[in-house]
Amino acid sequence: MDEFLKTLMRALKHMSATEKQDIIDDYREHFEAGLEAGKTEQEVATALGNPKHLAKMHTMQSTANAAHASKGFGDTMRMIGAAVSYKAGGGILVGCLYLVFLTALASLFAVAGVLVLTGLGCIVLIAVEIGASYISYAVLALFAALIFAPGGLLIFKGSAKLWRLSLGRMPLLARRMMRMDKEAAI
Amino acid sequence: MNAQFKKGVLELCVLTLLNKKDTYGYELAERISSRIEIAEGTLYPLLRKLKSDGLCDTYISAESGGPPRKYYTLTEKGKQAEAELRMEWTDFVDSVKQIMEDDENG
């Protein structure tokens, strides 16, 4: 029983702590009911099936729910991961999602670039305003420069990190897809 | 039995059993696996799906004197879904039978 639950727990890595616990509790109760009915732990475990495969079904199920309700980038990526690990047939879908994702990243880079340029423009503006003795405008331009340029750089850095993460994961995802394809169904 | 058959029918089996009476996970698994060969663990993802879709609900109870267990009960929506699925299933089986008979005669 412990081994089954431990394997299940480990394979449920992408899930929130409460949900994980909830699922583990269900299987624990199942074991207890089976033992009470006179079965051995081994018999119950065999009848339950492969805990890794069950974890995958739970992950699929839970991420599909989350997708209904939500929301952010993390959930989307988790769902893609789950889809890939669940069935290689999802590969095409995943590929499309990746394209969308990469396009989104490209536009992030563009936004970052525009922000940085605007910041630089503001610095030029400061010089111009000081030259024209419009000190208050120069101060405004200074603030704008301070906001735009670092903001742009931050977005740039963040996008670069995402970019590395996504491209770095591509081969990994592909390998997982192929491996999962070999695994037996229910 | 063919795995593709099982996948689709499992939900109908669970809904039907729950429509008869509130049941806990292990009992559900026993009832189904006594007739259809399944990996019993696959019931739990399905039960969680049914719950999140609002077709069933859960409560903790120590009925029949044993330790407390998580019981599953159908909601109104679940009962409707059961009736619809049952009808679809019956139609489907009838159609398949007809096709088989057609084939024998042809």
Image (cartoon, rainbow, N blue to C red):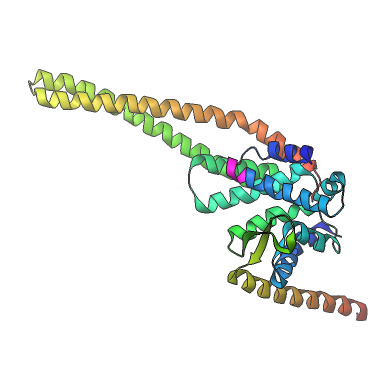
Q: Residue at x 10, y 25 (%)?
A: A136
Q: Name, please, the residue furthest toward the left.
A: A133
Please tell me whether residue A125 belongs to the stretch shown in magenta: no
- How far across and down, in percent of the image, does residue A166 sit? 56, 32
Residue farthest toward the front in the current orientation of the protein? B65
Quadrant of the rendered structure where residue B75 is?
bottom right
Residue drawn at the location 76% of the way across and 76% of the way down: B90
> Which of the two residues, A140 or A71, is positioned nearer the viewer here?
A71
Between A160 and A40, the one lying in front of the other is A40
Q: Is residue B69 above or below residue A107?
A: below
Which one is nearer the viewer's eye here, A14 or B34? B34
For residue B1, side relative to residue A157 (left or right)? right
Q: Within the image, what quadrant is residue A132 found in?
A: top left
Magenta stretch, overall SS: helix
Work out whether residue A16 can be spotted: no
Task: State yes or no: residue A17 in magenta.
Answer: yes
Residue B55 as seen in the image, left or right of residue A148: right
Residue A130 percent coordinates (x, y): 12, 19
Quarter of the N terminus of chain A within the rendering: top right
* Residue A182 percent location from the top left of the image: 80, 41
Which residue sits at x=38%, y=30%? Answer: A112
Task: Report the magenta residues as a range.
Answer: A15-20
Quarter of the figure with residue B72: bottom right
